Image (cartoon, rainbow, N blue to C red):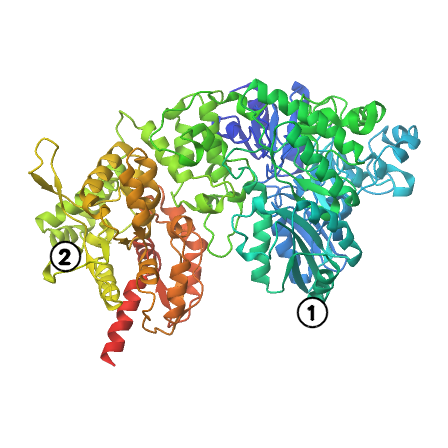
Amino acid sequence: MTDLESALRAAVRGEVGFDVTSRALMTMDASNYRRVPLGVVAPRDADDVAAVLAVCRERGVPVVPRGGGTSIAGQATGTGVVLDFTRHMNRLVSLDPESRTAVVQPGLVLDRLQDAAAPHGLRFGPDPSTHSRCTLGGMIGNNSCGSHSVAWGTTADSVRELDVITARGRRLRLGQDWAGAPDGLRDLVAGDLARLRTGFPELPRRISGYALDALLPEQGADVARAFCGSEGTLGVLTEAVVRLVAAPRARALAVLGYADEGAAAEAAAGLLPHHPLTVEGMAADLVPSAAALPRGGAWLFVETGGDTEAEARARAETIVRAADVVDALVVTDPAGQRALWRIREDASGTATRMPDGAEAWPGWEDCAVPPPRLGAYLRDFRHLLTEHGLRGTPYGHFGDGCIHVRIDFDLLTDKGVARFRRFSEDLADLVVAHGGSLSGEHGDGQARAELLPRMYGAELVSLFERTKAVWDPDDLLNPGMLVRPAPLDTNLRFSALPREPVDVAFGYPADAGDFSAAVRRCVGVAKCRTTSVAGSAVMCPSFRATGEEAHSTRGRARLLHEMLAGEVVTEGWRSEEVREALDLCLSCKGCRSDCPVEVDMATYKAEFLHHHYAGRRRPATHYAMGWLPVWLRAVARTRTAGVVNALAAVGPLAWAAKRLGGIARERRLPRVAGETFTRWWGRRKRRTVNASVVLWPDTFTEHLSPQVGQAAVRVLEAAGLSLVLPPTLRPSSTFAPFKARRGRVCCGLTYVSTGQLDRARTVMRRTLDLMTPVLETDLPVVVLEPSCAAALRTDLPELLHDDPRAAALSSRVVTFAEALERLAPDWTPPRVNRPAAGQTHCHQHAVLGDTADRRLREAAGLDGELTGGCCGLAGNFGFEAGHFEVSRACAEDQLLPAVRDAPDDAVILADGYSCRTQLEQLAGVRGRHLAEVLAEALDDSTAS
């Protein structure tokens, strides 16, 4: 233990982390930069903050305050001690509806403040797209804005008083009329009044540099306002009094379609006289599907408010009439508005990939110009991109003249980094020529601070340096930011990664087979750190259960990044730190769909486990649960299901079996079916002619819930489809083509989820051998278990990327609902006419989609929305020893509350075997596959 670590542990009550994991998680924010800290402290209160500053001051160690880590200019990284406010100093201290103020701690997530203010008809004005995970402290540090700044301004406009501690330990309460000003600040300002009155451009989104003009007498000498945007370089915020605004009782969203982004930018400023709440712009490049949007190549999202829906709509329609648009859409339905806003908010992640899949990066993310000049600026900006051979798609706060853009910089080679510097310098000059600010929202950080003299001139930058010296004479707080900055082309996060591709098992087709590129997908926007999910969203259930960064998708990606870098995580694939972080990953695949950049942590986890245990003994659960298909087939062959179930019901024997297999003691062992699905199928003695579909007998349907398969057969046949099962004979070898061996198809899911990828490939190739005759036809393959269908759709072709049969089988896979919709479009399902509750399977949401299921439920009279999230059992995860509490917490996040709140006559739907098992074991509720519900309704209609 180092002297610094020992001293901090003795001085503070909060957690002190100098371990590999704590440091690795804080090396990056959402920028292009990476700096390795010495350690991390999660202070419990202001006294802890003061103690950390005292210890670090004595040793000359820098201190970096950090909120949600979503900054994209590099200011939330540092080489000293990082203060993580999200763990403890994250409370809403008080909220006063009468004065419209709230007292908040720096680690409070913005959405939690909005949730508390909403019942009073209030809200915090600024709302960045990261509102579900950014913190108030981070917003104050960056002077964040968000989409509603045309109505409610920046964070500085919403701050009344700030409690801060200086690097030398002074506790100050900042406010107007020089309240809380450190010694020397007033004299500094008085000596340069003329420069402060003339040196700052007039525009709504001027965030760059220190806001020293807020200290002018005519501005009320507002020290709190001047502190906003200082990026943790002047003092450490411990508490804030913030203003709230009245939230409109009703809102309408006008989506205005234009021919291109230039036309949209030209139109934006002309809408401001109508007093909209937002004027946001984006182009078609960033929209996965424009089906929900009006015609056009670019759009403005213009929100209006009112006391009634009619009033809000009327204002929106007035704007539509005033705008010269190609097409327009006005939405007043809250759910419809949320769906449209998600398209805009996800752009920060979507923009990190160009249409051809090339990587794009921040760095020049949010320059701002006077709104009337935005169209001209964008034209010049596009020309500059072309001149440098770069590409990027602007979007953002068009009404404020502020655009965001990710650019396809090559930050991996010396030549590319040199071009990054040249472009940055040229763009800085262009922004200044248009009267703009290098930063219009996210701060200067390391990305832009070096270029501030181009915007402000040497004299004003010198005044910034003297201001820093007044507040922090020892340069202890976040050095290298804003003043005396580090060069913009140093500390790049990619410089530490290996230049040669890493040898891996999966194909990573979206990343050209490069595992490093797959890990680089995580840019840190941290959508995985949200504490609640909306609709059918899933990501990230383990973070919501634990609240720990290490158990978020971003945290795991950070550890994998550091594993590849080899500086902090030094054991490579053998790293125990990475294994521990991945241990609580449920492999739900939610990040594959919900992460804006489609990080696929389930695949990365399987890849890591494959290498981590190569040539070594694995955990018992990998043999017990990973090889589950083998054990269940053995039971079926020996017809010993009854014996196995009887033994599992004997307490001591069950305890011994669970201990031997690494299974959680809290779990009940599932019952094995007395008759497998295929044996039932064989007893039917029906000969199928001209089959229309192949029904896949997955392991769970075959051995554990054959009633699902039986129900599916009844429904599919009632819809007029003729079924066959996959072949069970395959050639034994090329040298004995007339000898055949029996076998059963298997998707390999359990081997993949436990990282036994060599075994998975063997099983998958045997399956492809069996399925070869089917692949010579055009028959679709119906898979009833969502996790198995997802494995066949994604894991199979990505693991056997060199076998064209894998892609062929993947393309044939359809779900139960898809089969009915595509192959029996004229069939009308029986009416159930009951409410439905339950959960959309996480793999269904992430990989398969549930559109066909929704339509089938609606046609059958099953009303109600299924929840999102993950059931928490997730195949082997919830059965593994040590996972029970997290598994239960995941179930309590969405699934169990939805079932408890369901009407007494509701049908509880759960298409996944794991989901049904979790419901039975934790709630005593029987969940049913949709096929079972429809089969029962068929029987009822026949009986009547």
Q: Quadrant of residue 585?
A: top left
**Between 678 and 175, the one nearer to me in the picture:** 678
Position of the C terminus, as image quadrant, is: bottom left
Please report whichever mark, 1 or 2, sits nearer to the chain's N-terminal start.
Answer: 1
**Between 826 and 70, the one nearer to me in the picture:** 826
Image position of 531 with respect to 940: above or below: above
Q: In terms of secondary structure, where does tag 1 sit?
A: loop
Q: Is residue 472 left or right of residue 620?
A: right
Image position of 638 with respect to 901: above or below: above
Q: Is residue 557 left or right of residue 784?
A: right
| Disc number placed over residue 674 in the picture, else none | 2
- State how far apart marks 1 and 2 are (Cα): 61 Å
Q: Quadrant of residue 434?
A: top right
- Is there any visible trace of residue 158 in the rendered image? yes
Q: In terms of secondary structure, where does tag 2 sit?
A: loop
Task: Verify CB contact (< 8 Å) between mark 1 and mark 2.
Answer: no
Q: Residue at x 57, y 44 (%)?
A: 285
Q: Is residue 264 left or right of residue 786?
A: right
Image position of 923 with respect to 486: above or below: below
Instruction: Report the number of discs.
Output: 2
Picture coordinates of residue 641, whole percent (x, y): 13, 52
Instruction: Give the residue pinned by disc 1.
Output: 308
Residue type marked 1: Thr
- Is there any visible trace of residue 488 in the rendered image? no
